[in-house]
Amino acid sequence: MDRARRRVIRAASVVALVAVAGAPRAQDGRTSTVQAAARDWLAITDRGDGGATWDAAGKQFRGALTRERWTEALAGVRKPLGTVATRAVQSTTFRRSVPGAPKGEYATVLFRTSFANKADGGETVTLEHEADGQWRVVGYVIQ
């Protein structure tokens, strides 16, 4: 093989490697479904309807505390923060287990959230894929 042809092949190989390395990875097909479920649930928290968030949460969540206790806790934490100014997904991860829960299919969605009274905040929503095929919230943390 002559020198010019080797350069062309080498250049084509480099372009192919860069194209493959720089190609975006395929998104997990569950990601948009999980993010939508988390956002729907957060929309209820944004309205301040603690009872409805408890009703919409997963079985593990409802089994961990009463509706009344959750409603009081949510109001105590969310109300002082004020309204949501912005909320953006930072990441979504899937796993088979989370601390303190039985093995299953879980997703954690991290949000960067700016509230009226806390500009640099965050929210972590953990969901479980329940037996009926629905993703439901089983954990919520405000940072």
Image (cartoon, rainbow, N blue to C red):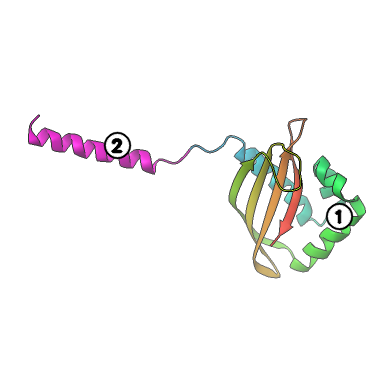
Q: Quadrant of the N terminus?
A: top left
Q: Quadrant of residue 86?
A: bottom right
**Mark 1 Cα shell of 10 Å, populated few (<14), some (14-19), many (≥20):** some
Q: Is residue 32 magenta?
A: no
Identify the amino acid type marked 2.
Ala
First in sequence, mark 1 or 2: give its number: 2
Identify the amino acid type marked 1.
Trp
Task: Please tell me which residue is depicted at 85% across the width and 48% down the height of the picture.
Answer: 64
When the figure is inspected, residue 29 is found, relative to residue 81, above or below; the finding is above
- Position of residue 93 measured from the top left corner of the image (x, y, whole percent): 61, 45
The residue lying furthest to the left in this view is: 2
Residue corresponding to mark 1: 70
Residue corresponding to mark 2: 16
Are the residues tagged 1 and 2 within 8 Å (C-beta)? no
Q: Is residue 4 magenta?
A: yes
Q: Nearer the viewer, residue 75 or 85?
A: 75
- Position of residue 22 measured from the top left corner of the image (x, y, whole percent): 38, 43
Distance CA(mark 1)–CA(mark 2)? 54 Å
**SS state under label 2:** helix
**SS state under label 1:** helix
Q: Nearer the viewer, residue 28 or 97?
A: 97
Q: Quadrant of residue 18?
A: top left
The dominant secondary structure in magenta is helix
Q: Which residues are magenta?
A: 1-25
Task: Please tell me which residue is depicted at 61% across the width and 40% down the height of the picture.
Answer: 32
- Position of residue 137 measured from the top left corner of the image (x, y, whole percent): 75, 45
**Mark 2 Cα shell of 10 Å, populated few (<14), some (14-19), many (≥20):** few
- Position of residue 43 measured from the top left corner of the image (x, y, whole percent): 74, 51
